[in-house]
Amino acid sequence: MNITIVGTGYVGLVTGTTLAELGNSVYCVDIDEKKVEGMKNGVVPIYEPNLEEMFLRNIQAERLFFTTNLKEALDKSEVIYLALPTPPGEDGSADLSYVLKVANDIGEMMTEYKVIVNKSTVPVGTADKVREVIASKTRIPFDVVSNPEFLREGFAVEDSMNPARVVVGASSEKAQEIMAKIYQPFTNTGVPIIFMDEKSSELTKYAANSFLAVKITFMNEIANYCEKVGADVDKVRLGMGSDDRIGHRFLFPGIGYGGSCFPKDVKALIKSGKQEDFNFQILEATENVNIAQKVILVSEIEKYFGGNIEGKTIAMWGLAFKANTDDIREASSLDNIALLLEKGAKIVAYDLVAENNVQKLLGDKIQYARNMYEALDNADALFIATEWPEFKNPNFELMAKRMNNKVIFDGRNIYPLEIPEQNGFYYKSIGRKTVL
Ligand code: NAD
């Protein structure tokens, strides 16, 4: 099948590459000329494990193409996926301007039947809006389908090639058949495709992300309470998670959720609720708890240094919002950096792949180290902001030699308590006793 993908970010590029891998001819459209030029020359613009190999293979097989020309791609494809940004607007609601602009362009450019598949995360009712915009420009028949994306950054290729389920909101039978054909390689191997109306499909995505944000936040509150009463959140987590109604996943406490999806989707669902005079109380609480949770260790750092961290050097391991990605959108590291700088501390940061993105944002407000140990030179404390695997089994002797103090604030609970204990480190994590 010939497919166009509009927007080649984390979702669009991975979806496009995956669909090409399944044998389709895929035309990826982006307005970012530099990005498109780079992709034409085999440069993957994002870091995502296992993407590059598949990307290059499909370019070579002449199934994956890149262009800035929407019309050219549109003319070649029956199916058009939208994988466009839906960032929070000023009031927290999802900004639909990217989606509606492209809908308008499609309406103006299309010359025969198309299925427009929306993969962006959008509020309930957006399929109707897209339909209206296109219909205002053309009399040619078309269908609009909601097909929310559930991939996880860091596992995007794996998730796209082995989805747990495919959700399709489509009221037209013709569009349902086309979608079933696209996803037939998955359904053939037992992956369920769940058809529903567009509104339910749009809400499924927000409900899923919001539920996960609530689950993480619930555990963060349990962890904070553990500290008050002397319980150990690791034990509580194992005890709780063994109940298969609860499960072990998403029960790891830490310095809050970030990334391009959970914060914005929770916000957008709260806002959508308000527009219907509906208060998502649980989501409002989740958002507030998470904002505080992100910087919960800063007051611990201040406490450790007797209330004043002016002039202290803090080494920061990890900048990405989670491991295995270069994405720093809403990363907890950034909230901590801002607060620590405001209080007069100096930051020397190290991240395997996210450093460039932070440098673009913060420039020389902080220093950058070439490796995890260099970041520790003359550091008064280490702050762990991302759970990158390489931080999990470090050389503590070397760390002790390079640091001024043997002090770790761990926002991701990556060490069992006995490890810093055996190595003589002060170690403050989340929801567990402090190792002194
Ligand atoms: P992104 O910012 O990484 O990528 C968006 C791309 O769209 C950019 O390359 C941008 O240049 C391009 N673009 C903007 N306007 C354009 C236009 N008019 N024509 C062509 N290209 C244009 O975004 P993303 O993270 O891939 O997210 C896209 C959507 O998918 C969002 O709604 C997001 O909520 C949703 N989503 C994201 C994830 C994730 O993990 N990142 C997961 C599920 C769903």
Image (cartoon, rainbow, N blue to C red):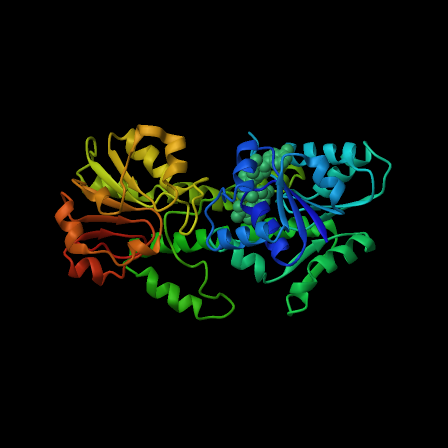
Query: What residue lies at 27% left-to-right and 61% top-to-bottom?
Result: 416
321 relative to 107, above or below: below
Q: Quadrant of ligand 1?
A: top right
Where does the image place residue 306, in percent across and percent down from the top left?
17, 38
In the drawing, does residue 84 fall left or right of residue 385? right
Query: What residue lies at 23% left-to-right and 39% top-to-bottom?
Result: 314
Which one is in front, 46 or 385? 46
Query: What residue lies at 41% left-to-right and 37% top-to-bottom?
Result: 357
Q: Can residue 280 be seen at all in this image of the molecule?
A: no
Query: What is the total number of numbered labels drawn onto the structure image?
Result: 0
Query: What residue lies at 70% left-to-right and 63% top-to-bottom?
Result: 184
Quadrant in the rendering for residue 350: top left
Where does the image place residue 135, in percent across and percent down from the top left?
82, 36
Where does the image place residue 408, in percent across and percent down from the top left?
23, 49
In the drawing, does residue 384 fall left or right of residue 207? left
Q: Residue furthest right?
A: 139
Which one is in front, 286 or 265? 265
Which one is in front, 227 or 153? 153
Q: Which quadrant of the rendered structure holds the N terminus?
A: bottom right
Which one is in front, 148 or 115? 115
Q: Can residue 169 be seen at all in this image of the molecule?
A: yes
In the drawing, does residue 8 fall left or right of residue 288? right
In the drawing, does residue 372 fall left or right of residue 353? left
264 relative to 243, above or below: above
Where does the image place residue 206, in percent across and percent down from the top left?
60, 48
